[in-house]
Image: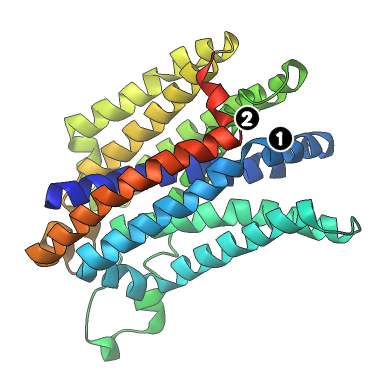
Amino acid sequence: MLNVVLFFLMVSLLLYVILAGADFGAGIVELFSTKKNQQLTKKTIYRVMGPVWEANHIWIIILVVILWVGFPEFYNVLVVYLHIPLTLVLLGITMRGVAFVFRHYDAFKDKSQILYDWMFRFSSLVTPIFLGMTAGSMLSGQLVITDDYANYSFIDLFVQPWFNGFSILVGVFFASLCAFLASILLIGESHANDRKVYVTKSEKATAAVVGIGFIVICYGFYHNITFVTDFIKNPLTVGLVILSFILIFPLIISIKKAKKVTTRLLAGIQVTLILVAAFVTHFPVLIIAYNKNINLLETASPEKVINVLGISLIIGGLIILPGLFHLMKSFKMIKVLDD
């Protein structure tokens, strides 16, 4: 049953990265657009982001529950030592949700709309950056896990692990990945004249992902970060990244031919390959700290707890997936299945 729990953990993480990435990225695309295109993107977001936005809550809740119930020690390390970036993520998600609702449903369309617009755009950028910084801190080797708090400063334990060059670069990389996913999604939901705007955005986002990803690898290699050096030495991870890069070319062709499904599948596969490459580099060690590593499997709850959790996830999946399908159908998103 442990494999079932791990399966749901990975699927939830993958879906959150892709769907929440596209959601956050829409705000990033809007932020880095001209005033005219910002209004265009704003209208498009209202029309297409409903089911994506709603579904994101499902995946992040499943992630938290699985870690909390199934891997409590692992969860404890995250919420204790990385409570600052995680709190900032929650604040960003909340700010973004509030701004998204009020700039659309506010009874009075006045200057407050300017505030709501900037709240939405700013939180759309900083939230994925802090998410990426959290992930980067788990792999940077600067996390200090100890019960001897007297010999360490607050900065050493709770700031330095995530507020460093490597973690910041990972955060920016994830934000660029979000912009890439959003631009790909918006291409298929735009009219012919508006489509060119998002095609250009997707090209710039692709260049940003490749460029920033290369910088992350170079920075990690130069500073001898264990995760990066092992990542480079692993033929499987390198192969997955190369394959993801090669898929850029059929993606470009698919965009030119206006194949919505193919384009989105290719983009999703690219992100999946990158995520899998990062995941398998050290699995099951998912936290590389300064003084110790945290093996996810070694932090698993007793077998009885895992069994109950696994059964609950299976039952929940049977309920959630039809509901998600109905949600997408209600928002007419099922039409994206037709090229």
Q: Is residue 184 above or below residue 94?
A: above
Mark 2: give few (<14), some (14-19) or many (20+) Cα within 10 Å.
many
Name which residue type carries label 2: Leu
The answer to whether residue 169 is above or below residue 183 is: below
Badge 1: residue crowd in 10 Å (few <14, some 14–19, many ≥20): some
Q: Position of residue 246 (x, y in %)?
A: 38, 18
State the count of labels.
2
Q: Is residue 151 left or right of residue 199?
A: left
- Helix, strand or loop at label 1? It is helix
Name the residue: 91% across, 58% down. Answer: 110
Q: Which residue is mark 2?
A: 186
Q: Position of residue 200 (x, y in %)?
A: 66, 24
Q: Secondary structure at mark 2?
A: helix
**Up/down of 93 relative to 201, above or below:** below
Amino acid carrying mark 1 in the image = Thr
Can see residue 225? no
**Left or right of 282 on screen, residue 193:** right
Residue 16 shows up from this direction: yes
Task: Determine the residue positioned at 47% across, 45% down.
Answer: 174
Q: Nearer the viewer, residue 156 or 34?
A: 34
In-image side of 312 versus 319 (left or right): left
| Labelled disc at residue 44 | 1
Work out which quarter of the rendered image holds the C terminus and state it.
top right
Q: Which residue sits at x=18%, y=35%?
A: 234
Callout 2 touching callout 1 (CB < 8 Å): yes
Where does the image place residue 299, in percent across and percent down from the top left?
15, 65
In front of the other: 149 or 193: 193
Closer to the chain start, of discs 2 and 1, is 1
The percent coordinates of residue 336 (x first, y second) are: 55, 23
Which residue is found at the position 24% from the left and 33% from the top?
237
